[in-house]
Amino acid sequence: MTVLEAHIAFKIEADKNAVNIGISGCPSFLPEEIDYWLYTAYLSKIATKATGNNTLRIPFEGNVKRVADLEGLVKTDKGLSLLSESISNRLTMNNFKSSITYGDDTQDKRMYFLEGILHFGSNKIATVKLISHEQATRFLETYNNKPWIEEPVAILEDNKLIVFIDRDLMVGPYTIDITYLAYPRKINNQDITSTLDEIPEYMQYEVVKLAADMAIENIESPRTQTHPQYVAQLSE
């Protein structure tokens, strides 16, 4: 589905669902507004598929269908550098950004961290698990705490990936491969031939329907309708 086709489908779906707006049907949306609602729905749909907050209650890779939903967005950045510290067991990757490009556009944010593979020593590897900051305090090597870390763990902080290792078991040099769900291509009505092909066609229609529902709900919301009245009262 191209962006142009998504815009047409949105208008059809929105007009069909605008039951409370009157006989004239759905109001016209600016192309930029349709872009906004389509991309908002796109991110929302990815989030529900990835986290398991969905009808099936199954997260990404919970079964074959969940994998098929998002496999086009699964990316791996390989051989990323890690800086070691002489007084600590922390390895840091600065500038935690993606290398994904969509044509001339760079999408440097990662949406969901899936897996890390630490390369160390002479062709040795270990999986890296993401944990919370509270848990990470138990893995930090200090003057009175020398933890035994069988598998490295990591946290995200201030656009950095910080990995905690056992320096006796894992010696340098260090690099890491990161597998993640990437943000999809931005939807831009000026590029009508670009597509939503990062996801399957059946899911593209789910995105369009959700976008139309969200846009109409926003218009029909009593809160939205009463806001101009409130502004008018303030100006009196």
Image (spheres, grey):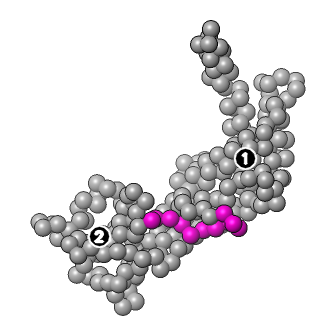
Quadrant in which the C terminus is drawn: top right
Tell me which amino acid carries mark 2. Answer: Arg
Q: Residue at x 17, y 66 (%)?
A: 142
Does residue 100 belong to the magenta stretch?
yes
In screen coordinates, is 1 left or right of 203?
right
Q: Disc 2 and disc 1: Cα gap in Å?
A: 42 Å
Q: Position of residue 99 (x, y in %)?
A: 56, 70
In screen coordinates, is 175 left or right of 200?
left
Residue 108 visible within the image: yes
Closer-to-camera residue (71/197)? 197
Tell me which amino acid carries mark 1. Answer: Asp
Q: Earlier in the sequence, mark 2 or mark 1?
A: 1
The residue wearing badge 2 is: 90
Does residue 191 belong to the magenta stretch?
no
Q: Residue at x 40, y 63 (%)?
A: 160
Q: Position of residue 124 (x, y in %)?
A: 38, 86
Q: In the figure, 166 relative to 202: above or below?
A: below
Q: Residue at x 73, y 63 (%)?
A: 197
Closer-to-camera residue (189/168)? 189
The residue wearing badge 1 is: 35
Spot the residue most to the bottom.
Answer: 122
Q: Position of residue 19 (x, y in %)?
A: 80, 27
Q: Bounds of the magenta span?
A: 95-105
In screen coordinates, is 8 left or right of 228?
right
Q: Position of residue 167 (x, y in %)?
A: 25, 78
**Crowdedness near tag 2: few (<14), some (14–19) or many (≥20) residues, C-alpha within 10 Å:** many
In screen coordinates, is 90 left or right of 54?
left
